Image: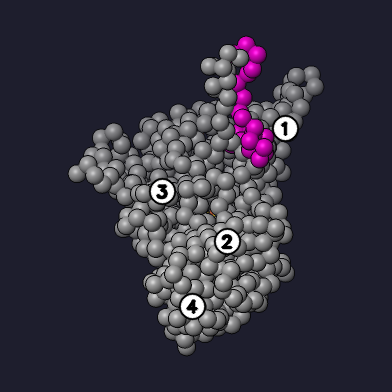
Amino acid sequence: MSSRIESGPDVTGNGHAGHPAGQVAMVFDLNKCMGCQTCSVACKVLWTRGEGEDHQWWMTVNTQPGLGTPKGWEQMGGGRPDGRPKPGHQPGRAEFGGGWSFNYDEVFYGGKGRSVHLQPTDTGDGTTRWGMNWDEDQGAGEYPNSYYFYLPRLCNHCTHPVCAAACPTGAMYKRAEDGAVLRDEELCQGSRFCMEACPYKKIYFNYTRGVAQHCILCFPRLEQGVAPTCARQCPGRLTFVGMLSDPEGPIHKLVHQWELALPLHPEYGTEPNIFYVPPLAPYRLHDDMSIDYETPRIPPEYLESLFGPKVHQALATLKTELERVRAGGTSEILDTLIVYRWPELFGPFTTDPAQLERTPEKVAVALRSKPAGNDHG
Amino acid sequence: MRVPEITDDPLQPADAAWRELSSQTVPLVPVPLESQPNEYIRTAWEGRPYGRVGEVQVAAARHGERLFVRLEWADAAEPNTEFPDGAGVFFPDSADDGPPVTIGSRAAPVRLWAWRDRLVVQQDLPAVRDLVASGPGVFQPVGPRPEPDPDERPGGPSEVSTGWALADGRWAVVVSGNVGAAASGRMGVVVWDGSNEERAGIGAVTPSWVPLAVA
Ligand code: SF4
Ligand code: SF4
């Protein structure tokens, strides 16, 4: 049984920060993300294969700059920029796009394999005009100085979850033991104020079942000492998981000690618990193709628009550390970011799920309203 | 309003029994903004008109243990693809409870039978929910969420049931449940205009209780 931070100021949205007993946090090092979407697919396979979940991607990776998912989400409002909730837009089905069905029958079995190509079936509701990774690798800038990077996103399990504060039924709550922001689907009545209020637009609506759904921070895994699947499956070894307040852990050092890992859009005011090491891009080139050491390839003001003004110091720190190592020195920061030993990413959550006794009933009861099987003893 | 005893179950709004019964026109007002349950909803709907359905025609009948309430109202607007139209009737525990405009309160919750139209993909969802309402949108299901498929629901079909039709720009909806819910002799009505994104506590409600004289 989880305990709720029930009637605290976070939930009413009227007061100051209330911190859970422990906050599980994550850091993504954007310098190492290659946009492979293994994290997205791992999450999809684990959590959103059910009815009404076709279009749901609790984990997404988008190319920046870009419109992302849902389309143009940064312009949709929500959050608590000055400590008070700001009205937001509820993204609709077409803005998420995706969840397509394809004309497999026609192409493979309908005798039209040479005249018709495989494509999503247009359902007339705009959902085939966007998707979770629609603007992949478009980026910005002009060759040879074009630029882009990848931004993995999930629910930020915010310290001020405006989503929960906007929920009229009390279905949404922040869990005391690990700070996961969760929803009791038994209580959710599908009014979707959470979707409006969340400034990161990381809540989906299950139209078939009439409930909202979002990333659960893999809480059934955390409870067993297993890292969230997006982190554990990442081949780039870039996703740290751990307790934010553990002074010995890499998360605390990256976020608080070195101030190298930053929240996305801190101005939204919800205090995310997912952090990013901002990207240093390769050097720019002059017209004569010589290296321009002075002008950053990614405009610093663009990075500031994403990660706030602290991004400049974070990038300066990264550069200094790189230079020191290039000159033959050592760097605890770079050693941390390199991750020589894979389990170092996962703090207290290093258990191998393959070694666990499986208890599927627990997960089924926690996440689905369907009772466990009834007539097979 | 008189609630006569009849001999059949008029679950469909076009059922013959309703033609014999008189109906009453009941005015509706927006659920007050200041009573909305949180700052987000109050801020988001400040200055934004809602509660657009101004009146509803109400008729009621009883057959044994079942109460049937028929609601009819004008709905000219194009349907919304995100938020369906809806309506509900609710009953206080006691005749002393405060006015119905907040759809119950923490101190005096009401029993709410809430119908909503189904989106195309929701054909298997129950169209009527049996809820306890402790304020505008502060709704909790009575018992566990019903299984979408009635055959799989423990105990068979839900105790509340419904029938509905949209014709000539008018919704007609019947909701039915155990007559015991109406023991206080009072009923409130709420209507949500989905085309205006109305849902939860954002809707139109009866400013005073509709008295029910159950035969
Ligand atoms: S990211 Fe959105 S859904 Fe997640 S806790 Fe923050 S406000 Fe809520
Ligand atoms: S799995 Fe890792 S490298 Fe691949 S997209 Fe996700 S975060 Fe980036």
Left or right position of A354 against A170: left
A329 vs A54, nearest the viewer: A54
Residue lying farthest right? A287
Q: Is mark 3 within 8 Å of ligand 1?
A: no
Q: Are marks 2 and 3 on the same chain?
A: yes
Cβ–Cβ under 8 Å for marks 2 and 3? no
Instruction: Tell me the residue that label 1 is attached to.
Output: A140
Q: Position of residue B184 (x, y in %)?
A: 44, 83
Secondary structure state at the residue bearing disc 1: loop
Mark 1 belongs to which amino acid? Answer: Ala
Report the mark closest to the observer, 2 or 3.
2
Left or right position of A313 against B63: right
Instruction: Tell me the residue that label 4 is attached to.
Output: B4
What residue is drawn where x is 36% and y is 63%?
B143
Report the mark closest to the observer, 3 or 1.
3
Report the mark closest to the observer, 3 or 4.
4
Q: Up-down: is A94 above or below A271?
A: above
